[in-house]
Amino acid sequence: MSYLEKARAGLKQAMPKPSSPAIADLTDGKLIAVKIASTVLNADIWIILTEPFEIDDGLAVFYPAELPFLATKNAETLKAIHKTKLAFPGERVTR
């Protein structure tokens, strides 16, 4: 066994194994929401794709209809919108 093969085998053994079936198979069933780690906001957010879907974990929730509006905003404005969504859960911005 070459050095590279030994290194790969060691890395494979060192990789963490999922302890529960928390990893979803995206080809199985309907995708209703996606949790995203936003680097701009420095926070996790939810994108709700299928309604009704409610989440109450303290994170901001965004909807597909809001995305075109949000795409035109700078980082400072997005952070202000994020703070507003945290203060008023479930509210939507489109203009």
Image (spheres, helix red, strand yellow):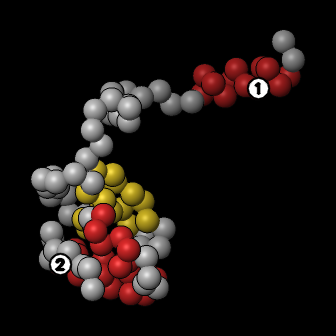
Q: Residue at x 37, y 27 (%)?
A: 19
Q: Amino acid at mark 1?
A: Ala
Query: 62 and 60: which one is in front?
Result: 62
Look at the picture and state if 39 lies above or below 28. Answer: below
Location of residue 14 in the rendering, given as x and y in whole percent from the top left corner: 60, 28
Location of residue 93 in the rendering, given as x and y in whole percent from the top left corner: 24, 79
Residue 87 numbered mark, or none: 2
Direction from residue 50 to residue 71 in the image, left or right: right
Look at the picture and state if 2 lies above or below 64. Answer: above
Residue 57 numbered mark, or none: none
Tag in front: 2 or 1: 2
Q: Residue at x 30, y 64 (%)?
A: 64
> Local crowd at mark 2 within 10 Å, few (<14), some, or many (≥20)?
few
Residue carrying label 1? 7
Q: Residue at x 33, y 29 (%)?
A: 28
Q: CA distance from mark 2 to mark 1?
A: 49 Å
In the picture, the quarter occupied by the C terminus is: bottom left
- Which of the 4 quarters of the picture holds residue 79? bottom left
* Residue contact between numbered discs 2 and 1, judged by CB atoms under 8 Å: no
Location of residue 24 in the rendering, given as x and y in whole percent from the top left corner: 35, 34
Direction from residue 28 to residue 90 in the image, left or right: left
- Which of the 4 quarters of the picture holds residue 63? bottom left
Q: Secondary structure at mark 1?
A: helix
